[in-house]
Image (cartoon, rainbow, N blue to C red):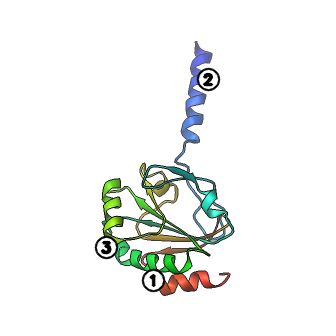
Amino acid sequence: MRKLLIIITMFLTFLVGYGKNSEINVRKGAKLPSFELMDFNRTKIKSHKILNNGNPTLLVFVAEWCPYCQHELPEIQRFYEENKDSVNVAVIFISKNTTLSDSKKFIDENGFTFPVYYDLDRSLMNAFKIKSVPYNLKIQNSVIQDIQNGVVTYDKLSELFSSGK
């Protein structure tokens, strides 16, 4: 009986230690592990399908209730419209203080067409250690190239993605 308890304890420790909410090393030059994104239709997609297609990626964490995000998202839309063939854009709405339906309504009311995802269980927010939004990452082949906290403008995005920075 004692051996069984030890085995069960070790198994539970393993599960807790290697759960899905692992932390991501968020710094320039860090390689991102694969993770799942969930779109607004609750369809899941592996991150490598977006991050490893040869184009750089703008990964943005936002919330529809955030005034800074409300200011930034039209800039993201403009950038997306002009660069969608050469830059991947993935906008992740966090679930803190909101719902999926509120985020959907916000997207629809504003006519945004960039790809949107929802962090239903806050696993991405926790893994990326997001403390405030908006939070922007430039990623190339799953490697973080740049991190921008706070509002970014269309001009800043264009500068960031214009060269091999």
Residue occupying image coordinates x 42% and y 63%: 131
Q: Single out the mark in the foreground, 3 or 2.
A: 3
Q: Is residue 6 left or right of residue 124?
A: right
Q: Is residue 9 left or right of residue 78?
A: right
The 10 Å Cα crowd at callout 3, few under 14, some 14 to 19, many 20 or more, is few
Query: Is residue 99 among the parts visible in the rendering?
Result: no
Mark 3 element type: helix
Circles 1, 2 touching at the beta carbon (< 8 Å) = no
Q: Earlier in the sequence, mark 1 or mark 3?
A: 3
To which residue does mark 2 refer? 7
Count of numbered badges drawn on the protein: 3
The residues tagged by marks 1 and 3 sit, at their Cα atoms, a distance apart of 14 Å
Amino acid type assigned to the residue bearing label 2 in the image: Ile
To which residue does mark 1 refer? 153
Q: Earlier in the sequence, mark 1 or mark 2?
A: 2
Residue occupying image coordinates x 65% and y 71%: 55
Q: Position of residue 27 (x, y in %)?
A: 60, 67
Circles 3, 2 touching at the beta carbon (< 8 Å) = no
Indicate the quadrant containing the N terminus: top left, top right, bottom left or bottom right. Answer: top right
Tell me the number on the disc at residue 67.
3
Residue occupying image coordinates x 61% and y 23%: 7
Amino acid type assigned to the residue bearing label 3 in the image: Pro
Amino acid type assigned to the residue bearing label 1 in the image: Thr
Q: Earlier in the sequence, mark 3 or mark 2?
A: 2
Q: Single out the mark in the foreground, 1 or 2.
A: 1
Q: Is residue 90 left or right of residue 65?
A: right
Mark 2 element type: helix
Residue occupying image coordinates x 37% and y 72%: 69
